[in-house]
Amino acid sequence: MTPVRLALVGFGNVGRAFVRLLARKHEDIRARYGLDLRITGIATRRHGMVMAPEGLDLNVLLERIQQNRDLNGLSPQPVPEDTISFIQKVPADVLLELTPVNYETGEPARTHLRLALMRGMHAITANKGPVVYGYQELSQLAREKGRRFYFEATVMDGAPVFSLFQETLPAARVLAFEGILNSTTNLILTRMETHGETLEQAVAYAQKIGIAETDPSGDIDGWDAAIKVAALVTVLMETPMTPHQVERQGIRHLTLEDIYQARDEHRRWKLVCRAYRENGRLVARVAPEKVPASSPLFNVMGTSSLLRLETDVLGDLSIREDHPTPETTAYGLLADTLRAYLG
């Protein structure tokens, strides 16, 4: 049995879902793969830190989560005062970086992952920032250290987007792609059409159920979609790109009148992500479009998403994910962790 020590930086909905998933899958992973996954450290912004070299009791940890209590009391030893010190000292083989995305620089997540690799940990993230701002650097550092830098959970949650091409489609090239990649805006547009809600009412609903942030601008102004496009272009089309290089328009200006007019035309408004080459230039765009009923994007409703890729060997290839949850993203993290040891 191989012990695998995991440290989490950031402990929001996805981090907590990861603990629940690990508790459910722990014995199955031991039996099938001979890996004993243990959480030996967690660093949070609001609930303190914990370091436990022998591993935390997941049931006790889940109880603390449910009671919304600080984690400090679970630590059998003094904990560092800041996240950098935590990464430098935590007894771990894998760092799971789960802090909020920074659309401007990818920090501090990029630094967190670099430090983890320098210490000889595998570096796994659900944060899109380090992919678009540090993909080449972190990938090279991982190779030098004989470790892995994985980020499957950054786009389409746990669906195999990056690993599909990195592992199962050798020599395949992505020529172009289109898709719906932001669950929040897709839910908002669905609510406007099916429930007759204004944009503001639909945003409030998304916030109520925990899909939208208190400040929803990252979604409705297209930043989240743009950084996902930049990540896909950077990795799958092998062209470094930041979200600022993506032509971006959000859905803030759409009204119920616009929604109903599109319905009368047998079309639907969708926030569509695209990337393609035109006259030797790579064009990347996020913008609302009235898609026809014949489009594969037309029936992607609610929080579902779809990515259609044009390849040089398989023609069109589509990946669809229906109604993802934080547990779906958590699975992407778990899959990356297992890939680091089984691949």
Image (cartoon, grey):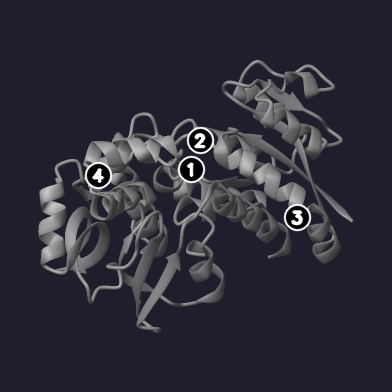
Q: Quadrant of the C terminus?
A: bottom right
Nearer the observer, disc 4 or disc 2?
Answer: 4
Q: Is residue 174 above or below residue 50?
A: below
Q: Residue furthest right?
A: 1
Residue identifier under label 3: 25
Report the residue at 39% width, 53% height from top. Answer: 231
C-alpha span from label 4 to label 2: 36 Å
The residue closer to the viewer here, 23 or 63, is 63
Asked if residue 240 shows in the view, the reply is no
Q: Earlier in the sequence, mark 4 or mark 2?
A: 2
Image position, residue 55 (x, y; %): 83, 37
C-alpha span from label 3 to label 4: 40 Å
- Look at the numbered disc 1 and give the secondary structure of its residue: loop
- Look at the numbered disc 2 and give the secondary structure of its residue: helix
Q: Are marks 2 and 1 in contact (CB under 8 Å)?
A: yes
The residue closer to the viewer here, 118 or 126, is 126
Mark drawn on residue 127: 1
Q: Is residue 321 above or below residue 210?
A: below
Nearer the observer, disc 4 or disc 1?
Answer: 4
C-alpha span from label 4 to label 1: 31 Å
Q: Earlier in the sequence, mark 2 or mark 3?
A: 3
